[in-house]
Image: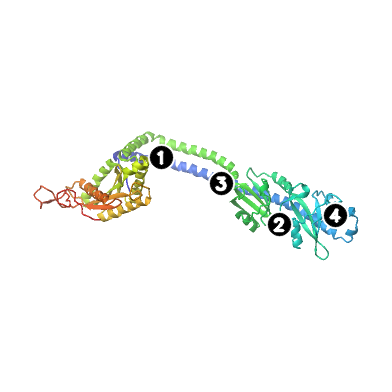
Amino acid sequence: MYHVTPAQSPMKKAFRRIRSRLSLNVIASVIAIGIFALSLNMLWESRQDTWREAEQSSRNLLTAVIRDIGGNIRLYDLFLQGVINRLATEGFQELPQQIQHQILFDYAAATGYMRPILILNAAGDIVADASSVMPRAGNFADRDYFKVHKEHADVGLHVSRPYRNRLRDGEWSIAISRRISDPNGQFAGIVSTALPLAKIGDSFAKLQLGREGTITLLRGDGILLTRRPFDENDIDRDLSKSPNISRVMRENSGEFVGISMIDGVRRHFVFAHVDGLPLIVQVAMSVDEIFERWRQKAFVLSLITLMLCSAVVALTFMFQRELRRRTLAEAELATLAATDGLTNLPNRRAFDEYFKREWNDAVRTQAPLSLLFIDADNFKNYNDHYGHGEGDVLLGAIADVLRTHLRRPRDYAARYGGEEFTVLMPETDQKGALVVAERIRQAILALGMPHEKSRHGVLTVSIGVGTAFPAPGNHPSLLFRSADAALYRAKAAGRNVVKSSSLNTRFHVAGRGGPDERMPGALLDRDGKGRVAANDAD
């Protein structure tokens, strides 16, 4: 963990001021939170009510559509069954054609049924036509509804796939048909009526569903018969593999929220099978449209809530405004003076002050003190190759790693200058400091930031570790010199490594009482000449 250490007395004064007004702040906070909670509860209840209303509206529409479609088709089926029953009447075939036509179709005409009814023989030829005594010429043996009845005696009422009606200038239609069997049970033809999809579409268009609402009529096997909004390209599509339609086919009725595979709109779907018929009706309303009015209401209520909360806050802080400004200004200046603007780490000035305090504390407690010098390898080459902007990004990345890996409250990271960073770890011996340094090195290497001008190919750092047991009379600069010497050795070793040095608490001082005189406060190098000495711990 790192921290900036500005002057303490202004912060203590500000703390005392804030503490004296704590009660007022608590009361204001409770009021603001209460207003917010009340508004949130109102919005939630309103949202739930909006959703329930949409669900009920969809269910009502679904019921109306099913009642309309199911009732009409059952009525058509009654007419078809009536035709079949009259065909089977004894002596019917011996009657004149005019009488046959009246017997077969006048009942339907008298009840207001205006759809054409056709009777096809076993070859698919029209043999009777409700629209005229002399049937129109035509053969429909190629139609799927004819083939189904011819091949299966137990189909009953059949709803065909959509087709282009050759008798009505290619109008999209579906056929409602039943099989005609001879006395021996053999296939003798069919009786059918055509239902234009445009008629179904007209009934759908009268319903209020919003701009993105849909009504879909499907066969039980997932074939799309028609849909609002109408699109000819959707007609006769097999949707049985769609997750939404698969669910609709499995379940008798239900509702869910899903995304339409046709237009990608997220909707609330309500569906049900039409009792006794191979049909499914699905009503869907856009989720966005359902909540459109609620969002408007929520915006207004949120605005009012914000205004009320703002008023409470403004009244509360009106008494503290000048004090707050002064305190914040003082704290900001202190922080800016001690913070590196690029990395947001403490700067060198802040680090030096902190180092002195920790050095003195270590002298008092006789605890170890470790210092890490961290240097970005080949940083000048990186800047020259990638530009100073990318160099700033690199330094920021190193700072983030340091923030992540220093977890103790007293561990202190800073940008010391240029591409150099320092980490001070109180009460940490050389072994512990090496562990932390290696973790930092590996973490920066794991960033994988490209560095074409480095022999490693990615961003690396060299780290020098110095450790001391400060004693009275020692100068803090000795630990700096020790860590700096270790950093120099790390770079000389090829970079991307950690090297360490440690201070002797007893040492020779050249020129003071001879070579055997020992005093605290100096450091031996390897040749004993009184320069920086390092105990290898690599």
331 vs 204, left or right, is left
Q: Position of residue 44 (x, y in %)?
A: 54, 46
Q: Residue at x 39, y 41 (%)?
A: 23
> Residue 372 at what x, y percent from top left?
27, 49
Amino acid carrying mark 2 in the image: Pro
User: What is the spatial separation of the Cα atoms under label 4 and label 1, in whole angstroms?
Assistant: 91 Å
Q: Quadrant of the C terminus?
A: bottom left
Secondary structure, mark 2, is loop
Disc 1 designates what residue? 24
Colour theme: rainbow
Disc 4 to disc 3: CB gap under 8 Å = no
As measured in the structure, the alpha-carbon distance from the residue carrying label 3 to the one carrying label 1 is 32 Å
Q: Nearer the viewer, mark 3 or mark 1?
A: 3
Residue 278 disc label = 2
- Does any portion of residue 294 appear in the rendered image? yes
Tell me if mark 4 has few (under 14), some (14-19) or many (20+) residues whose alpha carbon lies within 10 angstroms of its own: many
Front tag of 3 and 2: 2
Q: Earlier in the sequence, mark 4 or mark 3?
A: 3
Residue 45's tag is: 3
Q: Identify the amino acid type marked 3.
A: Glu
Q: Position of residue 77 (x, y in %)?
A: 78, 55
Disc 3: CA contacts within 10 A as few (<14), some (14-19) or many (>=20): few
